[in-house]
């Protein structure tokens, strides 16, 4: 597999990239910071297929997307999959207190992510298909008190990916919407660890299977699938009363 | 992500952490106020940090923060390998990489860490800070002897490279310096090539402590890895009987051709009530473990995991010691004292009824270069002690014996030693403290242990 990974330097993206490189997939890394990208490229090359290269690409600057993807496609000499794990998180309290931070989060997690996917989708379709795997979140499943704003961005991503899947599956585009629950990574460091918290590598294992099969929606860790099935059916008067 | 955004998010998550105050403990599960913050980016996160913590496998309070600043920076997310040269075995890695990760990633390629402690769940930063030793101490020395360079964040916020040739005083104070001389960001070490990923192991049943120490010395001449388990409940003529284990990497001709499959682990699901590990069950375990080894001598090809890391097979085995937790007492007695010395220390233990589930004995090679590195030429004894009302008195008594024999204790295991006892064991202490003061005059970097033992500001 020849794949572009946006966000491979940290957290679940790091774990997924390691699994892919270890089995021989050739990756092109996109992310922020030359130094950080070069460290991840070195890490992957120690015991896996060396990445074809890396380049800076910031979800906050949509003008950079096309050029970054072109560069990646050239270096890879093909393109089978585009994986987007990058994004930011902040607590609901922090976002409510800081409108500039809220704007930034919505820019990155919603607008930037969708514009990047649009560029990726065009390139994959031009090659008659491929896989687009994107990190949404269980936070986007239902409007919930602790994740009103972050959840809104992720709900948007979930709907966008579902729409893409309906519209382009026939043309060969396989869209995978990844919905992690709480996973212990740098992004969630500092938050109190809830029950069913997952490890990045377990998530990576499940997601990689979903990418290989083109599964449209994957929950990780698995426990979140039944949990979310229940949460989706709770009536509003219950959701208003619980803190979840 | 730009720096300003990153710091804004970091502030918000720090505020969140501060709300969730809590307790933190070492592997011995004796809690103290403290909480962890995690970061993949150690260069950024160490600027303000008072103490770094790895996987928390030190038993006592060396990875616990000082009371006035109850936050540690946990390094485990900084887990990238930054370069590996297969022609020389030189590896550069972030400080949070664990030996477990190295074993999973590099052993299939024929490389093993030059020195490993009895658990693979330690980080490289932790291995350097405790200057860990292993079954091959008599031939390979401590972990620090194989470290070529360290990238460190100093207390004054500067980032430097320390090595045996650059800033050697800082380097050797950091090897075994319990993380008190600066924050370790990256470690460069030389890995060891192995003939096969299998172990040829020989074991002997040994009848008492004196025979034991003799056979350890004999085995040391023949094997790179030796260690022994002793039954410290048996008394009188069979005091210190046990099983001696020795081994080496198997020759490819005698080893299976396949790569050893990772073995399944089981998890100790709950904290056991204190009485479970009372004297009768410890006695039964020790009796069984000794007589399970019916023949006097056994030889086999075995998996590296149970050979190096038998206790890693049970996740959270530390829950076994009940709600009050436990401590490990590990001391080393110099050769000049060993013959009768080990017997005298064990006698003190059995006399006081310090039933220990596990008692591990190992002959050590010469003292390393680390200013506070634990081992010295002699015999090391390690035993687990469940915390009871008289644990402090037991540790005091053992320490007095050890001082009389000219030995010392291992900081990575310690929670109960008194500062005056430590000073009496450690003639190198002043030298270490003066190097540390040179690099951190305000003692910004400190731990609960350094407050307890070195009198650092709380």
Image (tube, rainbow, N blue to C red):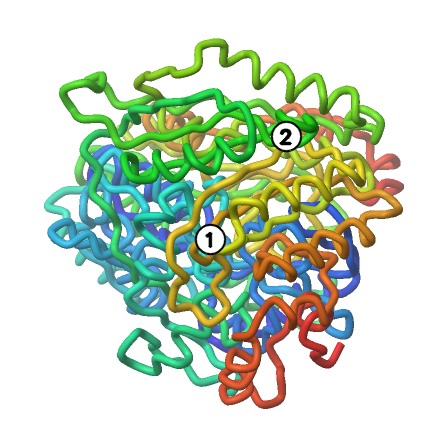
Q: A45 or B16, which lies in front?
A: A45
Q: Are the two marked residues, 2 and 1, in contact with CB atoms closer than 8 angstroms?
A: no
Report the residue that reaches farthest toward the top: B294
Across and down, in percent, residue B402 comes to 64, 56
Q: A155 or B183, which lies in front?
A: B183
Across and down, in percent, residue A20 comes to 29, 37
Checking the image for residue B335, the label placed there is 1
Q: Secondary structure at mark 1?
A: helix
Across and down, in percent, residue B272 comes to 78, 28
What is the crowding at mark 2: few (fewer than 14 residues within 10 Å), some, or many (at least 20)? many
Q: B129 or B428, which lies in front?
A: B428
Across the whole image, how many numbered discs are drawn on residues?
Answer: 2
Residue shown at 49%/24% (left/top)?
B206
A41 horizontally vs B398: left or right: left
What is the crowding at mark 1: few (fewer than 14 residues within 10 Å), some, or many (at least 20)? some
Checking the image for residue A47, the label placed there is none
- The residue tagged 2 is B239
B163 horizontally vs A237: left or right: left
Residue shown at 69%/70% (left/top)?
B453
B123 horizontally vs B84: left or right: right
Q: Secondary structure at mark 2?
A: loop
Q: Is residue A91 visible?
A: no
Q: Chain of mark 2?
A: B
A201 horizontally vs A149: left or right: left
Q: A162 or B152, which lies in front?
A: B152
Task: Look at the image and tell me in which quarter the N terminus of chain B lies.
Answer: bottom left
Task: Look at the image and tell me in which quarter the C terminus of chain B lies.
Answer: bottom right
User: Can you tell which quarter of the image residue B230 is in?
Assistant: top right
Q: Is residue B316 visible?
A: yes
């Amino acid at each position: 597999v020849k794949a572009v990974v946006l966000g491979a330097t940290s957290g679940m993206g790091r774990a997924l990239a390691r699994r892919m490189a270890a089995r021989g997939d050739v990756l092109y890394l996109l992310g922020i910071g030359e130094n950080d990208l070069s460290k991840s490229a070195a890490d992957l090359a120690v015991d896996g297929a060396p990445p074809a290269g890396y380049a800076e690409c910031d979800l906050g600057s949509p003008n950079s997307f096309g050029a970054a993807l072109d560069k990646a496609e050239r270096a890879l000499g093909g393109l089978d999959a585009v994986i987007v794990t990058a994004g930011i998180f902040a607590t609901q309290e922090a976002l409510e207190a800081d409108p500039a931070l809220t704007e930034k989060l919505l820019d990155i997690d919603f607008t930037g992510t969708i514009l990047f996917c649009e560029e990726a989708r065009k390139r994959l379709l031009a090659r008659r298909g491929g896989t687009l795997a994107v990190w949404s979140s269980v936070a986007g499943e239902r409007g919930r008190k602790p994740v009103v704003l972050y959840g809104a961005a992720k709900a948007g991503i979930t709907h966008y990916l579902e729409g893409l899947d309906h519209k382009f599956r026939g043309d060969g585009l396989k869209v995978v919407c990844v919905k992690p629950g709480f996973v212990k990574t740098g992004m969630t460091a500092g938050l109190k660890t809830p029950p069913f918290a997952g490890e990045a590598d377990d998530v990576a294992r499940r997601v990689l299977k979903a990418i290989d099969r083109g599964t449209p929606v994957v929950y990780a860790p698995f426990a979140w699938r039944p949990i979310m099935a229940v949460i989706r059916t709770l009536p509003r008067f219950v959701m208003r009363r619980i803190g979840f | 992500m730009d720096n300003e955004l990153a710091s804004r998010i970091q502030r918000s998550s720090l505020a969140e952490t501060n709300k969730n105050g809590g307790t933190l403990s070492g592997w011995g599960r004796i809690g103290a106020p403290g909480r962890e913050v995690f970061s993949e980016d150690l260069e950024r996160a160490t600027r303000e940090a008072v103490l770094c913590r790895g996987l928390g496998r030190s038993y006592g309070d060396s990875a616990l923060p000082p009371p006035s600043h109850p936050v540690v920076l946990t390094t485990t997310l900084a887990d990238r390998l930054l370069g590996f040269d297969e022609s020389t075995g030189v590896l550069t890695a972030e400080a949070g990489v664990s030996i477990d990760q190295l074993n999973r990633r590099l052993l299939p390629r024929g490389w093993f860490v030059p020195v490993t402690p009895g658990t693979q769940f330690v980080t490289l930063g932790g291995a350097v800070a405790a200057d860990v030793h292993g079954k091959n101490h008599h031939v390979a020395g401590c972990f620090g002897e194989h470290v070529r360079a360290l990238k460190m964040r100093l207390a004054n916020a500067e980032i430097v490279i320390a090595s045996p040739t650059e800033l050697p005083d800082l380097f050797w104070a950091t090897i075994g310096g319990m993380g008190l001389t600066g924050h370790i960001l990256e470690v460069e070490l030389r890995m060891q090539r192995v003939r096969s990923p299998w172990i040829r192991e020989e074991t002997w049943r040994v009848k008492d402590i004196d025979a034991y120490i003799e056979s350890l010395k004999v085995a040391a001449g023949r094997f790179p890895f030796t260690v022994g388990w002793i039954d410290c409940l048996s008394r009188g003529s069979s005091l210190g009987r046990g099983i001696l284990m020795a081994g080496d990497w198997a020759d490819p001709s005698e080893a299976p051709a396949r790569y050893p499959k990772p073995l399944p682990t089981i998890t100790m699901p709950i904290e056991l009530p204190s009485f479970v590990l009372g004297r009768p069950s410890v006695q039964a375990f020790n009796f069984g473990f000794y007589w399970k080894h019916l023949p006097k001598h056994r030889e086999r090809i075995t998996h590296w995991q149970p050979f190096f890391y038998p206790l890693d097979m049970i996740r959270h085995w530390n829950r076994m010691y009940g709600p009050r937790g436990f401590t490990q007492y590990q001391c080393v007695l110099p050769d000049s004292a060993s013959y009768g010395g080990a017997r005298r220390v064990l006698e003190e233990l059995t006399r006081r009824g310090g039933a220990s589930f596990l008692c591990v004995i190992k002959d050590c090679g010469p003292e390393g270069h680390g200013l506070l590195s634990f081992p010295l030429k002699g015999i090391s004894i390690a035993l687990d002690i469940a915390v009871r009302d008289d644990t402090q008195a037991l540790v005091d008594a053992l320490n007095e014996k050890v001082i009389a024999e000219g030995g010392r204790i291992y900081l990575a295991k310690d929670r109960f030693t008194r500062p005056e006892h430590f000073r009496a064991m450690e003639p190198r202490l002043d030298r270490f403290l003066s190097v540390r003061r040179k690099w951190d005059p305000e003692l910004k970097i400190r731990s609960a242990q350094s407050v307890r033992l070195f009198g650092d500001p709380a």
